[in-house]
Amino acid sequence: MIFHHIGSYLLLLRSVLKKPEKGKIYWKETMHAMNEIGLGSLGLIVIISTFIGAVMTMQIAFQLVSDLIPNSIIGSINRDSNILELGPTISALVLMGSVGSSISSQIGSMRVTEQIDALEIMGINAPGYLILPKILAGITMVPVLVTIAIFCSIVGGLIGGALSGAVTPSDYIMGIQEGFNGFTVTVALVKAFVFGFIITSISAYKGFTVSGGALEVGQASTKAVVIGCITILAADYLITALML
Amino acid sequence: MIQIEHIYKSFGSNEVLKGIDATFEPGKVSLIIGGSGSGKSTLLKCMVGLHEPDQGRVLFNGQDFSKLSFEDRIPVRKEIGMLFQNSALFDSMTVEQNIIFSLDMFTDMSKSEKLDRANFCLERVNLKGRNQLYPSELSGGMKKRVGIARAIAMSPKYLFCDEPNSGLDPETSILIDELILELTQEYNATTIVVTHDMNSVMGIGEYILYLYKGQKFWEGSNQDMMRSDVKELNDFVFASPLMKRAKETM
């Protein structure tokens, strides 16, 4: 069963990558999808990552109670944890739940109301027209959102530390500047790129292959989120193992 | 002209179509009728390429459509217009955008030419001025008419209609039937309508193909049908008291 799905998923991706009928229309659709994924998720990502950063600072401070360890280390740990793991992975899991389920139900509804059949009868490559713009939007906007998430969580850590008294702003800022390795940002962006592809392609596949009615569209959307989250975590492990 | 030869189609162990042959001529409205589960919609989907037949051929002006690749099918598809049972309008687009969508994709017409064409199509289906409405703002009958306007946007040679009257009141049904007949003659299109609406059969059925349990059971005109003594056909056609009375008064 799982091999059947993997095969169908790869065949769908092959159809997605066929030459577009008219580049101008695909470009317009891509811009629309970028707006939906990027701007539509910005508020959620900012709120979640700011709170995560604040909580992380307080928890690190709680665990590192020693006169031998300088307080600035809280900033360093917070920075690296957010860049390498929390920023990309938590953002991707949140986006899988919001953007992924939306893509899946949107395409699934089009399938059960015969709108996809209408596209095919017109001679339009339906997987290309419906899925390619979303994948392009995903692989460009998710890295942007992850970058914003990392920035917000580091700022959140600063605010959380100052408000709780866990670390002074000057110690925290000193910590985030100490021993910075630029390669961690590369790892985060590679993860974000791959997660962007996973979020959009898996949810689009589940929506595109749905059959039945409203109930099945809802079930497909739930399955898309579950499968997508597991795939994100597996990809997270693989990228970390390969790059670090 | 569309010819279908020995069309077989199964879903798992369920054999839906069992070797159907028929010829549909241009300029005529051909009706495929039959009870629920007789294979009407499956046959229509095999003809337009939404289902691949297990065996048999679908010929559009002699060209075997079922053997063509996706790319090679595009020129034929550009000549096909289809009206779906539930209209299948793109709900994120306005009426106007629905109509000009295929023109956007496949023609190099200027914006004003496309708008002129959309206005012409809307006028043709008596929906002038409804350009900026969304499908959710339209009634069932209006959706069908927008579906027809979208289907004729590319001046089709082949027009397929899947149960165009389902869910419509009798007056709107007659309006849709008349529109299908007029457009068939206007474009000299080969029109195939799947229906079980007897008003449509009597009103526009120039050629009727009756399917029974996945097989072609009878074919002829609506006048021949009234005189037929095929039991299965009579059981289907004269099931309603109104049709029974019509036969008695003949």
Image: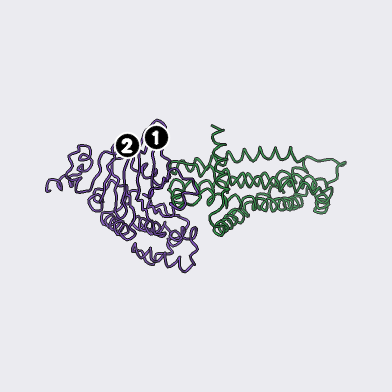
Residue A119 at x, y = what percent?
46, 51
Q: Which color was chain B given?
A: purple
Q: Secondary structure at mark 1?
A: strand
Q: Is residue A160 visible?
A: yes
Note whether B188 is above or below A53 in the view shown.
below
* Residue topped by disc 2: B214
Q: CA distance from mark 1 to mark 2?
A: 10 Å
Say which of B167 and A63 sits in front: B167
Disc 2 packing (10 Å; few <14; some 14–19; many ≥20): many
Q: Which chain is green?
A: A
- Kind of residue sitting beneath label 1: Ser
Is B68 placed left or right of B164 in the picture? right
Q: Secondary structure at mark 2?
A: loop
Q: Is residue A106 visible?
A: no
Per the image, the residue denoted by label 1 is B10
* Rendering coords of residue B23 (x, y %): 31, 46
Query: Which residue lies at the image location 39% right of the left edge and 30% below the top edge?
Result: B13
Q: Choose between B221 and A228: the one closer to the eye.
A: B221
The residue that appears at 73% across and 40% down in the rendered structure is A240
